[in-house]
Amino acid sequence: MLNLSLLRQFSKLALCSTPNIPIASRGIATTAAVQFKITEQLWAEPMKKKKKIDPAIVKAREDRRRKKLEKQIRRLEKNARQLKPIDEMEVPLELLDNFNKRKRPQPKLTPEVIEARALLQKDWTRYKRQEYIANVAQIDRIMGAQRRALDKLLEESEDLYNEAIMPDMQLIPYEIQGPVATPPIKNYLSPDGEYIDVSKKWDN
């Protein structure tokens, strides 16, 4: 058995309290007389030895990775201008399959019907032309009357003329109040419950 005094001499407390004894960087103080050293537990795994790889294999891997990236870039550039599909705007496949069955033949018009439609189109064109000419003439009459009235007013008083041509500041900040929402429907029962959103998500 070791002597208790010897153990007490080698204890950490005794070594730390002894003057002029160097302190090790790993925790336990050591001296030349002690002749042993204790280090902390690192719990580290030994480093694996790196395998030497042929430079040709490394270059081939880099080439494959570069070609893959270039292919993805070309695919993105090709599909850059394609719009995202909208399911609501696409025609169902069932309707496309039954297109020939649902297609209605064009009715054969008789010469009398064709002539009547042409005459009706001409009458409608004449009516719209006369309506346009009447509107333009009415606007010209109103503007002419306004111009003549201002000329007469200028002959009477220049101050009244300047006040007449001034903009009405009460009409410029025009505000109007009306219904801000659809009026409620009487005896309408709003739906209540859970629903599942099945809309597709598209990444940019």
Image (cartoon, rainbow, N blue to C red):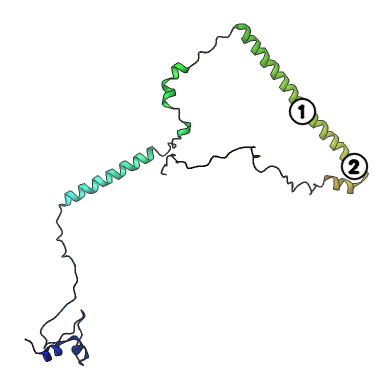
Pointer 2 local density, CA inside 10 Å: few below 14, some 14–19, many at least 20? some
Snapshot quadrant of residue 41? bottom left
| Residue 88: percent from left, percent from top | 47, 33
Q: Label 2 is placed on what type of residue?
A: Leu
Q: Which residue is mark 2?
A: 153
- Judged left or right of residue 20, residue 123 is right
Q: Are marks 1 and 2 in contact (CB under 8 Å)?
A: no
Image label count: 2
- Judged left or right of residue 128, residue 84 is left
**Which comes before the other along the chain, label 1 or label 2?**
1
Q: Which residue is mark 1?
A: 135
Q: Is residue 25 above or below residue 33?
A: above
Taking the spot 68% from the left edge, 14% from the top edge, the residue there is: 120
C-alpha distance separating marks 1 and 2: 27 Å
Taking the spot 63% from the left edge, 6% from the top edge, the residue there is: 112
**Image quarter of the C terminus:** top left
| Residue 114: percent from left, percent from top | 62, 10
Q: Label 1 is placed on what type of residue?
A: Asn
Dot 1 falls on a residue whose secondary structure is helix
| Residue 34: percent from left, percent from top | 11, 86
Seen from the viewer's position, the closer of residues 9 and 29 is 9
> Which numbered tag is attached to residue 27?
none
